[in-house]
Image (cartoon, rainbow, N blue to C red):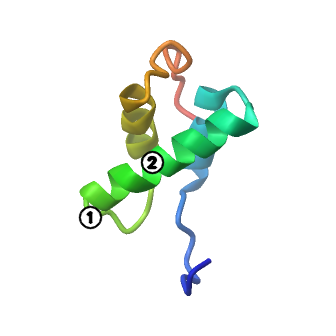
Amino acid sequence: MGGRNATLFTERALRSLYRCSRGIPRVINSLANMSLLEGFARDAHVIDEGIVYSAAKEIGLNGYCKNKEKA
């Protein structure tokens, strides 16, 4: 993990990743990558569900996350 010992994605962020990607591995990778970029842009130390939803919107997964119930 590149020298990081702390958790990077919160539990809710991981659930949001799964929900928005519908469990499709390629989409999970794309969304996780965009979430990391979004977190970097925000200077975030942890990726939360808000960052995941922003990343999903950025890559056009709005329809997937339309019914984003809070985890």
Report the side of 28 relative to 9 (left or right): right
Name the residue nearer the viewer: 17 or 30.
30
Q: Is mark 1 on a helix, strand or loop?
A: loop
Q: Residue at x 58, y 28 (%)?
A: 20
Residue 5 percent coordinates (x, y) = 58, 83
| Residue 71 higher or lower than 12, as above or below | above
Q: What residue type is labelled 1?
A: Asp
Q: Which image quadrant is residue 58 in?
A: top left
Q: Which image quadrant is residue 39 in?
A: bottom left
Tell which residue pokes out farthest to the bottom in this image. 3
Q: Which residue is drawn at 43% across and 63% down?
A: 46
Residue 27 percent coordinates (x, y) = 63, 34
Q: Residue at x 56, y 87 (%)?
A: 3
Report the side of 69 relative to 40 (left or right): right
Q: Residue at x 41, y 38 (%)?
A: 55
| Residue 3 higher or lower than 31, as above or below | below
Name the residue nearer the viewer: 59 or 20.
59
Q: Distance between the residues labelled 2 and 1?
A: 12 Å
Which corner quadrant holds the N terminus?
A: bottom right
Residue 18 percent coordinates (x, y) = 66, 36
Q: Earlier in the sequence, mark 2 or mark 1?
A: 2
Q: Which residue in the protein does label 2 denote? A: 35
Q: Which amino acid does label 2 sit on?
A: Ser
| Residue 11 higher or lower than 26, as above or below | below
Q: Residues within 10 Å of mark 1 (few under 14, many from 20)?
A: few
Q: Which residue in the protein does label 1 denote? A: 43
Which corner quadrant holds the C terminus?
A: top right
Residue 57 percent coordinates (x, y) = 39, 26
| Residue 13 higher or lower than 43, as above or below | above
Q: Can residue 35 be seen in this view?
A: yes
